[in-house]
Amino acid sequence: MDRSDPRSRTPDVRSTLRPGKPGMPFIYVYILNDRTGRHHYVGVTDDLKDRLGRHNRGEVIHTSKHRPWKMQSVVAFDSLQKATAFERYLKSHAGREWAKRHL
């Protein structure tokens, strides 16, 4: 799909998160790797299976070029604020270095 096509735009996942919903009380921060191991992606979701499927179907603009993706690491949080703070940290230089050493 063309990037100008509104169907190709993925809504901000944070607008769809529902912490505390029945059966899924956690918010997850995840790290994806492509098959070569040269590209990674950090994101946040409340539904890991659905989100990985969207990445691998090419529905997420930032990850569509390097499919397929696999989960490298997942960390669960009980608070959206904690999860988004950790996601921001992992996207920083210090956070990327920490993830290389520990995840």
Image (tube, rainbow, N blue to C red):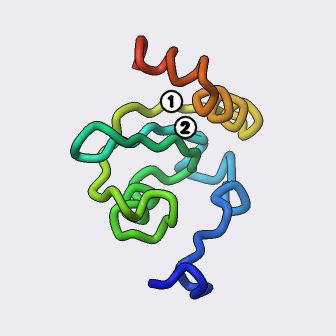
| Left-right relation of 45 to 32 | right
Q: What is the quadrant of residue 88 in the picture?
A: top right
Closer to the chain start, of discs 1 and 2, is: 2
The residue lying furthest to the left in this view is 35
Residue 56, position as x, y percentages in the image: 34, 62
Residue 14, position as x, y percentages in the image: 69, 55
Task: Give me the residue at 41% from left, 12% from top.
Answer: 101
Task: Give me the residue at 54% from left, 40% from top.
Answer: 28
Residue 21, position as x, y percentages in the image: 64, 53
Identify whether 21 is placed above or below 86: below
Of 64 and 57, the residue lying toward us: 64
Is the Cβ of the residue at disc 1 closer than 8 Å to that at disc 2?
yes
Disc number placed over residue 29 in the picture, else none: 2
Which secondary structure lies at badge 2? strand
Identify whether 95 is placed above or below 62: above
| Left-right relation of 73 to 70 | right
Identify whether 53 is placed above or below 80: below
Residue on which disc 1 sits:
75
Q: Which amino acid does label 1 sit on?
A: Val
Count of residue discs? 2
